[in-house]
Image (spheres, rainbow, N blue to C red):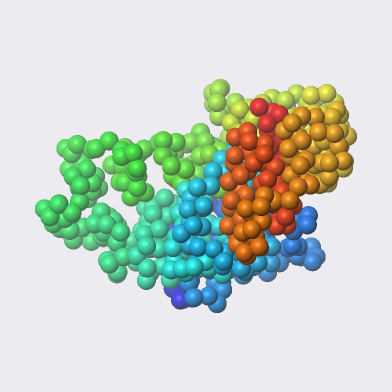
Amino acid sequence: MRADGAFLAVLLHVAMAAPLAAQDPLSAIDWLDQQPQEDTDFGLVPDAAALAPQKQEPPVTRDASRPEVSVRPLDAPSVDAVGLLPPHVTGFPQTLWQASDTAQLADLLIAQNVDGQPAMQSLLFALLLAEALPPEPADGGFLLARIDRLIAMGAIAQAAELLALTDAKSDPALFARVLDLSLLAGPGVAACEVLAGQPNLAPGTDYRVYCLAQTGNWDLALTTLTTAEALGDIPATKVNLLLGFLDPELAGELAVPPPSLRMSPLEYRLYEALGEPVPTHTLPRAFANADLPGDSGWKAQIEAAERLVRAGAISEQRLFAFYVANQPSASGGVWDRAAAVQRFERALDGGDPEEIDNALRQVWTVMAEVGLSTAFAKAYGARLAEVDLAGTGASLQMQAALLSPEYERLSRRLEPRGLSQEFAVALAQGTPEAATAPDPHARAIAEGFVNPPPPHLQALLNGGRLGEVILRAMSLAYQGHLGDDTALSEALATFRAVGLEDTARRAALQSLLLTAEG
């Protein structure tokens, strides 16, 4: 199995090398991204500050050296156990899932809505990538649910890394994901070469035809397509797409069907090959990865990165590197954001407090409009805290500091102004009850730091269903995100009860500051 996993890792690396180019800035899990690895090097990993629990959570390392990272599956009876992040990194026990039911966990994973909640996104990534003993039945369904959830979030590199730990060539369901990930990243030639040797792995005749052509078997591809059409095994719309792909001279005479509402990665590549590419902003999030190399233009590249950063699928450093890569050629929308970031960086480099204040107010406004305040804070919060600002600039400086991964350290460096900031600073230090809550929402947050978890979740905890409890608490956090303060309080209490102190603080700070921001 190890040999097959190594082969698959190389296959996926070749397929994804173009869109995940070396221009990707330092991943937040820098020790995972930089360590020499035999098989994989995708460069897209979620935020370390979020994935490696802090505060009262189990320590990641006893010193400042980079920990050794295991990317091997546990000695377990199922691929459901594989993960990229071992227990000493996540802080989760190996029994995270073991007492729960696979179908129930899969439903909870699918049901999670973490949009607009960076702390919950980071926690979900930690759960999806965790190496732990599987739930029952350990039939591979839990791994498929994890991979599908990663793809839905746009995290195609992380999904590919998980697949590289399996013997996907012996499982049609897993290999179907390999094919789709390869096609999301590029033409998928390497995956097609595997399929050419093992046609039984094809998820459909359309994939079989496409891969035969990609590996040079054009005549067999055409024969396979016409036979499938005659037998009614392939829809007429797909027949025209494939015929146009197989015979470019015929393509102009064919009626190209409109894109389907549920487009597959294969259909996306076929439209592209026919010279009628479908804009990725109209498609599910995973397709945004196709625009990251910049082949569709700088604007599409930035918009794709913004979309993926909002989902937590790529590092915010990558987005801000794109913002400063060129000079905006117009105004409005993405161009205003690029111009504002470039102006802010120049001001920050220049060191003049007045210029920084002006640039900060402008860039904060345009980032907040598109839900990127936390991404901006993660990229610049610590550096911005070194500047002596006043007035509005100082208020934004405090918000950026408290939304950054170093919120606790920076909260001790900056001076709070007013009850709201005093409460936020106390929250950052883990003692919101020590400050006056300025409104009912803040009081609900403070209660989450002193109350026990709700009885129904405590009962599940007593039954050893830790992972399930965390997922259910995340669902409560989403209700809190929608305005249910009681649900938010219960979620925070649960996170703290299971040792996720850093998650609780970050979720509370984001709820407090981003709600106040509007």
Q: For this view, does 228 lie left or right of residue 515?
A: left
Q: Is residue 431 above or below residue 358?
A: below
Q: Which sits in the foreground, 441 or 200?
A: 441
The answer to whether residue 314 shows anywhere in this view is no
Residue ID at (64%, 30%): 368
Q: For this view, does 388 lie left or right of residue 483?
A: right
**Farthest-out residue, left:** 230
* Count of picture labels: 0
Quarter-of-image position of residue 422: top right
The answer to whether residue 329 shows anywhere in this view is yes
Q: Which sits in the foreground, 113 or 39?
A: 113
Residue 166: x and y in percent read 46, 69
Residue 226: x and y in percent read 14, 53
Residue ID at (49%, 75%): 77
Residue 101: x and y in percent read 50, 63
Residue ID at (59%, 41%): 478
Residue ID at (41%, 35%): 282
Q: For this view, does 28 lie left or right of residue 267?
A: right
Q: Is residue 89 above or below residue 343?
A: below
Question: Looking at the rendering, in which quadrant would you find the C terminus?
Answer: top right
Q: Which sits in the foreground, 496 or 356?
A: 496
Q: For this view, does 350 lie left or right of residue 367?
A: right
Quarter-of-image position of residue 410: top right
Quarter-of-image position of residue 348: top right
Q: Is residue 340 above or below residue 184?
A: above
Q: Which sits in the foreground, 112 or 421?
A: 112
Residue 255: x and y in percent read 19, 36
